[in-house]
Image (spheres, grey):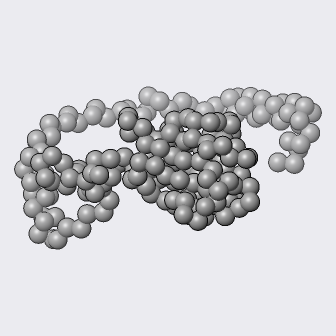
Amino acid sequence: MSGKRLLKIRLSLKGRPIKTFTFNKEVISVGRNPEADVFLDNPGVSRDHLKLEMTSRGFYAVEDLGSANGTFLNDQPIKREYLMNNDVVRVGKFSLWVNYEEDRRTMSASGKLHPQAFEGTTVLSTDELEEMMHHAQVSEPEAPELSQPEPIDLSVLRMPISLPFVISVAILMFLLGTVLAQRMPWARFF
């Protein structure tokens, strides 16, 4: 069964997570039957409520098996529909959040582990880390020399401040404050 897609189902009751299932089966049964792959012990769930069936394209389809209370996919009543990532199948008070994952345990055609099998944390010894750093430094091209930026003469940017200028700015600020206080009474408290 290597190379197949896994179906991950997160089961929740009234929004509270209960359990997570991961399947790599052709048919997954859901219902009140204790023999079901996903057993839902609730009177609102039929004994054989629905099944999830792998299609020839590698996706699952959800099919209602004539349940009394129906099956809902993304809050729409259904008889049979294809499942996509992040779909929510609702059965009574239960929600099944569906996601597809690739089986990371599979081997490639060359017999090596699939590249996704190496996702996560990798632990290296000091020697392996030094060798990796040395290889990265040797294979890295030399950085080009950057020219020094020309210094900026800040004296050109400075503006002499005169007494008439300071007085006019103070008057403008006073007038602006007065207008704001009249238009926005809450501004007086700041």
Q: Taking the image as drawn, is residue 15 in sight? A: no
Task: Determine whether, in the image, residue 113 is placed left or right of residue 85.
Answer: left
Task: Determine whether, in the image, residue 19 is placed left or right of residue 75.
Answer: left
Q: Taking the image as drawn, is residue 141 in sight? A: yes
In the image, residue 1 sits, relative to residue 184, either above or below, namely below
Viewer-proximal residue among 148 and 54: 54
Viewer-proximal residue among 129 and 184: 129
Residue at left 61%, top 42%? 64
In the image, residue 101 sits, relative to residue 14, either above or below, namely above
Residue at left 43%, top 55%? 23
Residue at left 18%, top 48%? 108
Q: Position of residue 27 (x, y in %)?
A: 46, 49
Q: Position of residue 188 (x, y in %)?
A: 88, 44
Residue at left 58%, top 65%? 34
Q: Residue 30: which quarter of the image?
A: bottom right
Viewer-proximal residue among 84 and 165: 84
Viewer-proximal residue among 107 and 184: 107
The image shows a total of numbered marks equal to 0
Task: Determine whether, in the image, residue 38 is placed left or right of residue 109.
Answer: right
Q: Residue 10: which quarter of the image?
A: bottom right
Task: Determine whether, in the image, residue 4 is placed left or right of residue 12.
Answer: left
Q: Position of residue 125 (x, y in %)?
A: 17, 71
Q: Position of residue 50 (x, y in %)?
A: 59, 48
